[in-house]
């Protein structure tokens, strides 16, 4: 969920991760090797074959020592500094296939870079072959069919700029620089989910290059196991080079923001929990705890102005005497501009903000002063009513998809930031076994199983069928099920 989601004015990403009170309601992630998972063995020294790969690809090829290598391997989250074996900025699908074939031959892990905004830095990995999709940015909008087709390296701002010009919209996050593919494949913590479902619920087709080098067309009736898996299962199943989205009418949002500050944080959290428990589909809402300014509650109502005015009166009454700031907005393709920063993150999906969990959040908020921030973004409506097993995305049912984050400027502040994030996540775990996977730090396999819950066994079987060597593991990794490899 993006901090732009309640429909208020945009702030910079530094405002969010460092100190600014954000102005709206509710936004992709990792590591090459996971704890408890041994690195893949390399079949042979790939050096000579790298020379051959460099000659065969049409796109830019970089390896250690190449001019531009150090700059190209940087990702948005500066907490991660990784050195891939080589990087290919693919010019076309054939380049992607050649890279995957090289990785399969040498059992080299593949890192896929779309927008480069992964919270856990998964667009680059030590010893991996990076496939950079930065040239796959074509956006085509079919106004009559209400479908948008985009390349795998497209950013949110470019997709929404094209659809909004046609008066249409598909649920996306609120930072325009984030990659569409990374957001969607994880499921998508998005604006508009109450009315339209989240990003993966609107993915109606995709082109995928699998570990065997095949180029597959996914969608209803076409490779349905893979189509099911990529809607929430992340980049575990191949390189997505094109995505097709269902479009909806773009609606205005009528919003209110309540600057709680540090006064009665627990009381404000309880009021927020009560308000969002049975919110209409048209509502999107967030509660932010900022390290400097304290609490901010936001609510946006999409669609009818008169209905919005009636509904927002409930929020004014609940937070009185806190003054409400009122806003009207339309979808914005740019949203926040989130600047590069070192950052620690954790995620939690809180099903109900009441009882003891309120006190846990309030204590964490008090400890966050000068250190970190939390965002509790409402997930409701259509996305909540879709059955848990309809897609791989596990965050069904009404709840609060929560981001816990702390940034630092000086190296000596890193330990404190990481400790607060880890301790807050652990304290919430009894009430939040699930989480948006793009909000998770590099995790042990047990955490991924816990997050996907009932969907994990099917994901592991599909992984074993299409990527038994686990080439695509520079992500929140789903490990291939043992003994269920792809039939011959």
Image: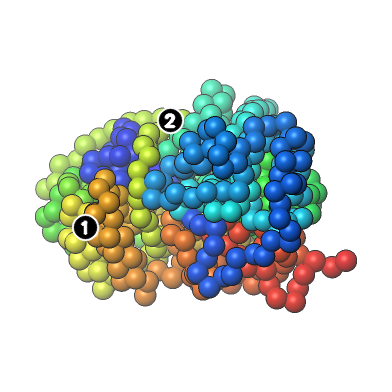
Kind of element beneath mark 2: loop
198 on left or right of 439: right
Q: Which of marks 1 and 2 is nearer the N terminus?
A: 2
Q: Is residue 81 above or below residue 247?
A: below
| Front position among marks 1 and 2 | 1
Q: In this view, does 21 lie above or below 9?
A: below
| Cα gap from disc 1 to disc 2, whole angstroms | 28 Å
- Assess whether mark 2 and mark 1 are in contact (beta carbons under 8 angstroms): no
Kind of element beneath mark 1: loop
202 on left or right of 310: right
* Structural crowding at the residue carrying mark 1, measured as other residues with C-alpha within 10 Å and reported as few (<14), some (14–19) or many (≥20): many
289 on left or right of 438: left
Q: Residue drawn at (49%, 31%), measured in percent from left and top?
A: 157
* Label total for image: 2
Viewer-proximal residue, 291 or 356? 291
Q: Residue drawn at (39%, 63%), measured in percent from left and top?
A: 348
The colour mode here is rainbow
Which residue position is annotated with label 2? Answer: 334
* Residue 120 visible to the viewer: yes
Residue 428 lies, in percent from the top left, at 33, 69
Q: Residue drawn at (22%, 69%), measured in percent from left and top?
A: 359
Specify the farthest residue to the top: 165
Which residue position is annotated with label 1? Answer: 368
Viewer-proximal residue, 58 or 288? 58
* Residue 185 visible to the viewer: no
Q: Quadrant of the C terminus?
A: bottom right
The quadrant where residue 16 appears: top left
């Amino acid at each position: 969920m993006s901090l732009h989601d309640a429909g208020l004015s945009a702030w910079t990403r530094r405002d969010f991760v460092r100190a600014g009170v954000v102005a709206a309601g509710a936004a992709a992630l990792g590591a090459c090797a996971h704890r408890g998972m041994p690195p893949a063995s390399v079949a042979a020294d790939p050096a000579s074959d790298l020379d051959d790969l460099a000659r065969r690809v049409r796109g830019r090829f970089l390896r250690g020592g190449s001019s531009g290598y150090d700059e190209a391997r940087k990702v948005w989250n500066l907490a991660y500094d990784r050195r891939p074996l080589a990087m290919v900025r693919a010019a076309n699908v054939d380049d992607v296939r050649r890279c995957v074939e090289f990785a399969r031959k040498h059992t080299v892990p593949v890192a896929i870079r779309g927008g480069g905004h992964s919270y856990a830095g998964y667009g680059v990995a030590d010893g991996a072959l990076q496939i950079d999709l930065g040239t796959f940015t074509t956006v085509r909008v079919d106004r009559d069919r209400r479908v948008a087709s985009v390349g795998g390296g497209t950013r949110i701002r470019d997709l929404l700029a094209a659809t909004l010009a046609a008066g249409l919209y598909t649920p996306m996050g609120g930072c325009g620089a984030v990659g569409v593919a990374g957001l969607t494949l994880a499921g998508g913590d998005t604006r508009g989910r109450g009315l339209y479902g989240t990003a993966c619920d609107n993915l109606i087709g995709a082109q995928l290059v699998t570990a065997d080098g095949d180029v597959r067309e996914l969608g209803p009736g076409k490779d349905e196991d893979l189509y099911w898996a990529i809607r929430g299962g992340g980049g575990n199943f191949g390189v997505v080079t094109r995505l097709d989205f269902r479009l909806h009418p773009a609606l205005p949002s009528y919003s209110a923001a309540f600057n709680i500050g540090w006064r009665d944080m627990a009381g404000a959290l309880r009021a927020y929990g009560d308000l969002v428990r049975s919110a209409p589909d048209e509502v999107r809402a967030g509660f932010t705890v900022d390290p400097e300014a304290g609490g901010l509650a936001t609510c946006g109502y999409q669609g009818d102005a008169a209905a919005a005015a009636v509904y927002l009166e409930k929020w004014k009454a609940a937070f009185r005497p806190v003054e409400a700031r009122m806003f009207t907005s339309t979808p914005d393709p740019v949203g926040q501009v989130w600047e590069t920063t070192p950052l620690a993150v954790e995620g939690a999906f809180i099903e109900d903000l009441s009882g003891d969990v309120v006190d846990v959040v309030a204590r964490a908020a008090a400890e966050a002063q000068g250190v970190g921030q939390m965002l509790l973004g409402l997930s409701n409506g259509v996305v909540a009513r879709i059955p848990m097993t309809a897609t791989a995305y596990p965050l069904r049912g009404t709840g609060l998809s929560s981001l816990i984050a702390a940034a630092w400027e000086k190296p000596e502040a890193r330990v404190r930031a990481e400790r607060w994030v880890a301790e807050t996540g652990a304290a919430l775990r009894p009430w939040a076994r699930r989480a948006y996977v793009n909000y998770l730090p590099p995790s042990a396999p047990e955490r991924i199983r816990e997050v996907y819950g009932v969907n994990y066994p099917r994901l592991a079987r599909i992984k074993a069928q299409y990527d038994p060597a686990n080439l695509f593991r520079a992500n929140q990794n789903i490990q291939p099920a043992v003994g269920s490899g792809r039939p011959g």
